[in-house]
Amino acid sequence: QHQILVFLSYQNIAEIAQLLDVAELISRLEAVMGEFSQRGAGLVQPVRSVVPLQKHGGFLGLMPAYLAHEDILCTKMVAFYQREQGSSLPTTQATVLLFDPVSGVVSAVMDGEVITARRTAAVSAISAKLLMPRHAEILCLLGSGHQAVSHYEVFTQAFTFKEVRVWSRSKERAEEFARAAGGPVTVCPSVKEAVEGADVIVTATNASEPLLFGKWVKSGAHVAAVGACRPDWRELDDDLMRDAVVYVDSREGAAAESGDVILSGAEVFAELGEMINGSMPAQRDKTTVFKSLGMGIQDAVSAKLVYDKWKSQQ
């Protein structure tokens, strides 16, 4: 019998995502990140292969993954481009393919934007849960695109902050972000003003040069950095990278792709999964950076959750 191939558009998935329980997504991702850091045979995830499109200023990344325990086979294709300010096109565009691992048949072709934004924010929330100051009151978001929106949604559901601030290279975009947000958000005129005194700072920008400087960051703060996914792109300066305790989603990924890690020469203290497993400590009292590059296994878990949710509604 032939399986029906499902196409799930951005609109389909945006609707399904509203029904997804953030806590469930977080716990599923926590489990898979912990398993990844044990380097067992149950997860197969090659480092992302990247095709440079120099002529057009872009890249195509391929992120396959197989999770043996849950029997999930998935590949994400993501195109990322450095856009001019004011461009109507998104920086990243992603498509996810979900396979039936038994037969190799493709079961779903899914828009990857919501899946990517949701899983990234949920993984950042895991880092914040383990590393942010105990009585964190101020959340600061640098950036106003899909990732910033998703981080706002996930973080305000998972935690309680007294104040949320946003800064964006485009003041209009920041104001739009604040209007669309479900709660009060302060638009800040500069990065410096946005981050001063903040307990948790999320950097979700398409910067290629550092814009967050260690001298502005409060001692003991937690930074979740999700931009700068190329070896020559950065969001954080050397001072911050060297003074903070640095955690990553994957050591191999960070060593191959993170300009913030590579160019600063900063030492990676631990993977998020090592902290989840208890094999490395969470240094909550120190200033911490979680550098997130994104992993195929995260897309696989999230895509399967969305697909199962969709199937249960049919």
Image (spheres, grey):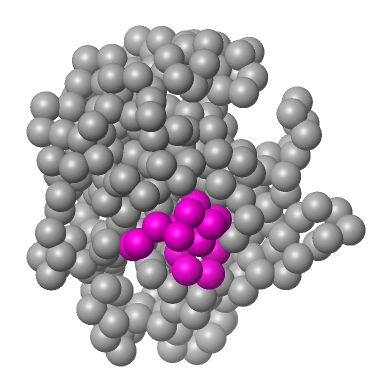
Q: Is residue 225 above or below residue 104?
A: above
Measuring from the top left, give residue 117's x and y in whole percent: 47, 45
Q: How many marks?
A: 0
The one nearer the camera, 138 or 102, is: 138
Give the quarter of the image for residue 162: top left
- Overall secondary structure of the magenta stretch? helix
Does residue 52 appear to the left or right of 170 in the view shown? right
Q: Which residues are magenta?
A: 253-268
Image quadrant containing the C terminus: bottom left
- 273 horizontally vs 302: left or right: left
What is the x, y in percent for residue 152?
A: 38, 29
Evaluate whether residue 196 shows in this view.
yes
Which residue occupies the foreground of this view, 126 or 55? 55
- Whether 80 is drawn above or below 223: the answer is below
Q: Is residue 83 left or right of residue 96?
A: right
Residue occupying the point 76% across, 55% down: 58
Residue 35, image quadrant: bottom left
In the rendered image of this protein, does residue 187 appear above or below residue 133?
A: above
Task: Name the residue rendered at 41%, 83% in the picture.
Answer: 44
User: Which quarter of the figure has residue 121?
Assistant: top left
- In percent of width and height, residue 151 lies at 39, 35
**Residue lying at 63% horizontally and 44% vertically, measured from the top left:** 208
Q: 129 left or right of 78? A: left
Find out whether residue 257 is within the magenta segment. yes
Q: Position of residue 28 (x, y in %)?
A: 25, 60
Report the front residue among 42 and 310.
Answer: 42
User: Can I make out residue 149 in this image?
Assistant: no
Residue at 35 percent across and 19 percent down: it is 196
Q: Which residue occupies the foreground of this view, 264 or 246?
A: 264
Residue 157 located within the stretch drawn in magenta: no
